[in-house]
Image (cartoon, rainbow, N blue to C red):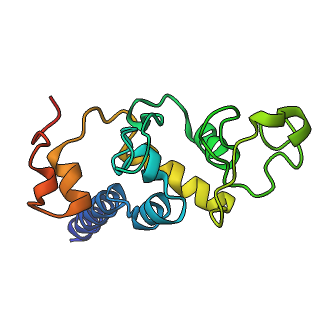
Amino acid sequence: MRVTRLATTIAVGSAMAATAAAAGAQEDYSYARRLYLDKAQCSYCHGWAGDGAGEGQSNGGAANLRQSRLNRAQLVTTILCGRPGTAMPHFDELAYSDKRCYGMTEADVGKLKPSLPPGSTLQPREAEAIADYVLAKFVGRGAITRAECEESFGKGARACSDQPAKTP
């Protein structure tokens, strides 16, 4: 009787652990997605799917995040510090006020200092959330699929009809 009870307890515990692990695998990125799309407006240049296509008004040519080789720390630094000499802005209002960005000050970077979008500063935790979102949803994902499109625009969205059902 005691062995049966122990076996039942172990089985129930294992099932609960498996359920918790599966729930953790479906992490909620809605906060980070809002930051990406709305607050920082990353999609304006990088596109809703991080493919670098940008929105219609954008000149395009932004980095294709789906092909990025940056790790989390590098993504956070790029978000907060921008990329000197490129169109990638910085989102840390104190960037280049000291050596926090690439070990350079405003005097060091000079005319190559990235711009600060008006009203779009981010806290480090927000940049970290965006980096986690980019890593989970874009980096290494290949071509955009219909499922990814429908995740953004809704099931059966007309905008998604040209997307392949699966990655080729």
**In the image, residue 145 above or below residue 85:** below
Q: Position of residue 113 (x, y in %)?
A: 76, 39
Q: Is residue 103 visible?
A: no
- Left or right of residue 168: residue 105: right
Where residue 72 appears, x then y in whole percent? 57, 41
Task: Answer above or below: position of 125 versus 53.
Answer: below
Q: Position of residue 27 (x, y in %)?
A: 37, 60
- Out of 48 and 54, give the one closest to the viewer: 54
- Tell me residue 145's x, y (percent): 19, 42
Residue 153 in which image quadrant: bottom left
Along the horizontal axis of the image, is 77 left or right of 158? Answer: right
For the point 43% across and 60% down, the residue is 37
Q: Residue at x 55, y 35 (%)?
A: 71
Q: Residue at the spot x=62%, y=46% of the render?
A: 76
Report if residue 20 is visible in the image.
yes
Q: What quarter of the picture does the N terminus occupy?
A: bottom left
Question: Which corner quadrant holds the C terminus?
Answer: top left
Q: Nearer the viewer, residue 141 or 34?
A: 34
Count the marks: 0
From this view, report whether residue 35 is shown above or below residue 25.
Answer: below
Query: Picture quarter containing residue 123?
Result: bottom right
Of the pair 13 and 30, the residue shown nearer to us: 30
Q: Nearer the viewer, residue 108 or 127?
A: 108
Which picture quadrant has residue 156?
A: bottom left
